[in-house]
Amino acid sequence: MSTQPEHNNTLDQLSSALDSGELKRMRFMLNKGLRPVEAAKLLEKTPPRERQILWNLVSKENEGKVLQHLGDDVQADIVSRMDASELLAATEGLDSDDMADMMQQMPERLMREVLRIMDKQNRKRVEKLLSYPEDTAGGLMNTDTVTIRPDITVETVLRYLRRHTDVPQDTDSLFVVSRKDSFIGVLPLTRLLTSDPQVMVREIMRTEQAAIPATLPDQEVARLFEDEDLVSAPVVDESGKLLGRITIDDVVDVIREDADHSLMSMAGLDEDEDTFAPVLRTTRRRAVWLGINLITAFIASAVIGLFEGTLEQVVALAVLMPIVASMGGIAGSQTLTLVIRGQALGHIERGNIGWLFNRELIAGALNGTLWALVVAAVAVVWFGDTTVGIVIALAIVINLLAGAMAGTLLPMALKSAGIDPALAGSVLLTTITDVVGFFAFLGLATLFFG
Amino acid sequence: MSTQPEHNNTLDQLSSALDSGELKRMRFMLNKGLRPVEAAKLLEKTPPRERQILWNLVSKENEGKVLQHLGDDVQADIVSRMDASELLAATEGLDSDDMADMMQQMPERLMREVLRIMDKQNRKRVEKLLSYPEDTAGGLMNTDTVTIRPDITVETVLRYLRRHTDVPQDTDSLFVVSRKDSFIGVLPLTRLLTSDPQVMVREIMRTEQAAIPATLPDQEVARLFEDEDLVSAPVVDESGKLLGRITIDDVVDVIREDADHSLMSMAGLDEDEDTFAPVLRTTRRRAVWLGINLITAFIASAVIGLFEGTLEQVVALAVLMPIVASMGGIAGSQTLTLVIRGQALGHIERGNIGWLFNRELIAGALNGTLWALVVAAVAVVWFGDTTVGIVIALAIVINLLAGAMAGTLLPMALKSAGIDPALAGSVLLTTITDVVGFFAFLGLATLFFG
């Protein structure tokens, strides 16, 4: 195994520290005691140094099986320390789609090298899969399908299957194709089993389920599987030729990542983020997000700076101003989250955004009025100044309306501009509610007290 | 259909407004043109009044099939306007698990009423399912399994299946049970099809996949399906008796809701939230969240209020103070999101939280120092005052450390206390970073300028 010197060092130290019995026990657990998916989970929840040690204890035969179950970030990390021949050995015996997935995580140079030393048949198959972007039906599919012709009997199919000892995992149906490999229909195993042996495949196959084009985005594939409760589905090229099939296990990963994406993006994180990434990588990635948000904070400060005179005059304004910005931000981010989730579920479109905008505006006005009265009452009692109460009440209503508008329109605008609303939405929303909040509050105060 | 007077009113108006040809076209589309899952999607993305009109156009036979595909919030809304006999008619012909799911959304009184008028066999089946909490394996399962005995040949099984014209959807394996219905093993259809007809079931069944106990929480069921790439799995009671099976389509819903839960909770929303909920319901739900967050804002204001004297003296502090609170909040919420996601994925436990805490603290110190220097430089140039620069730099470092600590420890503490970290975490985190941020900044300023 090629590891960087520092890691070998650590490993050596730890090897001598741990008695050999302990290491043997760990090696056994990783390769025999745990299934590959469990070994992968263990690696994912281990800090970097210990993770490297554990990885070195995984046996050659298990490397590929464990690798394929790791999250993208962790996988890329381990793969970057292996060379092409190690990788080829590790990935032998994997499904071609899992092999292609893993290769997509490799640096370009390493990927080319692995392809070069691969045997010809495998190379062709993997290159075919690599030709489709990772986030399309083509990138999700594997090529191990069982195909039959329409003009044979059920009995012939049964006899044919009995000669196969190894039908691919998750096979719930056979695909019916023409002589030229054009997709014609699907024969579910349950239907095969309940049909008269003398019946022709043509008579019992299902043709109402359309095949999935290889270029369909993976999120739409996931929606199709969810809506139609599919377990597997055929994938075809533009001429209708059967290319492979997508199975539910790969779709479940898409659904999980898709749903994690919004959550993580709203905090400026990547959905594949390694929970136990090393400190320097973490610091670097977070620094970017903090820098972007600092711009927002400076803009807010600049707005406050416009009203230094008023603040000097009435110090109560400085005490109360965060309330206005905060209430607008909270209300806006509720709307924003609802709209982003609605977009992900395919609920929101041109025809109903108007209704949603109005509802958010009315809800914002009602809640704005309610809480404006509460805050105003507290402010008047606190500072014994009715004007401060009036000013903050007006500013809160204005800012909740701004939050409702920004929360609805921002994700729509960002999406049409091809920018991820989950990533950019929260920063922009905060900028808007901070600027409007401080400007409305201090601006009104300047008018009233000026 | 029993609708509230105002809805009938709207419907009447619209009925006369729309020419009857248009209504016929819509009725056809809802019942014939679209599949039930598509009709449900259409209802979900329609504002409340139009939704009620559309629902009235769904034919009696389709009501149940459309209802079962609706989100919980929308479903409960429609169900609350139906009476028991309408509901019973609508749910006839559904899988028993879908019927039980729907009944769990009904008000207690209505559920009892539906059960009372149900035929005896169905009532027993549904009551059995209702006896398990919705979020356990028992609540997810349905009872339509195909079971066989271990001591028969493959040929007998094939003959038996051929007599069934209707094997339940998503059947990928048969369950092998004893005479007393105890679960023994699983016979995948693929194995059945590739085996010699003379072989006994006992010899080819798989026994390595354990059955799922009915009390297992649904999130763990989902993890099991994901880890083992299952399509269906048997569910047993504490004595090992087969109760039913869980299929991947229901598990996919759990995965989707589970992942949506963190996103929506962090904004104080429910994962089942109807995107097009009526304005008053929306206002009421949001008001609670705004009220809770207002407490946070008042606490922050109270902290600022402690330093009125210093703020009056140096107005630059009022201009810059939101930057300190904002940077701490952003850094803290990145840590918080990562930890909450890590908890959901089962990555975080007692053994590795120490490492994570240290990493976050170091990353916070590094990023704190970096951005403190940037902000200090800007502040010195802006206000021509070195002391302000020193004070804000120190406060930013302190607040990023507070954010890192709170972001790591809060979700751990909340989870052990049985409180949902996604729901309570962000409010508490903001309270901490606001209080620490304002206190550190204005407190240090009071020391330096006092």
Image (cartoon, coloured by chain):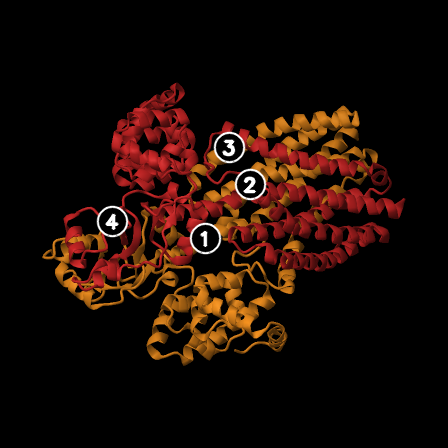
Chain colours: A orange, B red
N-term mark: 2 or 1: 1
Is residue A362 visible in the rendered image? The answer is: no
Find residue B147 and name its label.
Answer: 4
N-term mark: 3 or 2: 3
Dot 4 alpha-carbon crowd within 10 angstroms: few under 14, some 14 to 19, many 20 or more: some
Label 1 and label 4 in one chain? no
What whole-number distance in Å separates the C-alpha atoms at marks 2 and 1? Answer: 25 Å
User: The disc labelled 2 sits on which kind of residue?
Assistant: Gly
Find residue A407 and name its label.
Answer: 2
Label 1–label 4 contact, CB within 8 A:
no
- Mark 1 — residue? A256
Which residue is at a point 36% across and 26% down the rendered structure image? Answer: B112
Which residue is at a point 58% across and 39% down the rendered structure image? Answer: A332
Q: Element type at marker 2?
A: helix
Label 3–label 2 contact, CB within 8 A:
no
Find residue B22 and name its label.
Answer: none
N-term mark: 1 or 3: 1
- Mark 3 — residue? A358
Q: Element type at marker 4?
A: strand
